Amino acid sequence: MSEVKPRIRLPRSATAGKAAEIKTLVSHVMETGLRKDADGNTIPRKIINRFTCEYGGDMVIDMELEGAVSANPYVEFDIMVGDATEVVFTWYEDGGNVYTETKELSVG
């Protein structure tokens, strides 16, 4: 996971029953599948192709990313706050690699 670095920003404290803004950025070396190596062989595509977020065990976002996605995908969205609990972020890469980060949402 050395080439993948997720960054997540949650509010310091959220209010139950209100929306909270979530921001994520994952640093990831990506390949479009269109470039060739020194020998003329196509370098296989390697992109983050899916992003999910679960809050309190419920899926709040599940998005597919296509070839035009940036090298370091940035995603911003809101969740409706309930009790303080874990927020689980997962990025899926071509080739089967999966990167997961868990953060605690503080409700005050």
Image (cartoon, rainbow, N blue to C red):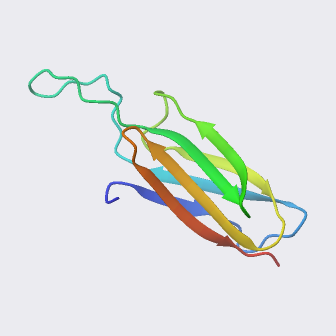
Left or right: 82 as drawn, with respect to 43: right
The residue sitting at 45% across, 51% down in the picture is: 98
Furthest residue in direction bottom, as rendered = 108
Q: Position of residue 4 (x, y in %)?
A: 38, 55
The residue sitting at 66% across, 48% down in the picture is: 76
Q: Position of residue 33 (x, y in %)?
A: 32, 26
Q: Is residue 79 above or below residue 84?
A: above
The residue sitting at 54% across, 53% down in the picture is: 90
The part of the image, by quadrant, that contains residue 37 is: top left
The part of the image, by quadrant, that contains residue 95 is: top left
Furthest residue in direction right, as rendered = 17
Q: Position of residue 18 (x, y in %)?
A: 88, 61
Quadrant the C terminus occupies: bottom right
Q: Nearer the viewer, residue 16 or 94?
A: 94
Left or right: 45 as drawn, with respect to 84: left
Q: Position of residue 3 (x, y in %)?
A: 32, 54
The residue sitting at 67% across, 56% down in the picture is: 54
Left or right: 42 as drawn, with respect to 23: left
Q: Nearer the viewer, residue 3 or 85?
A: 85
Quadrant the N terminus occupies: bottom left
Q: Is residue 84 above or below residue 10?
A: below
Q: Is residue 4 above or below residue 64?
A: below
Q: Is residue 10 above or below residue 108?
A: above
Q: How many marks?
A: 0
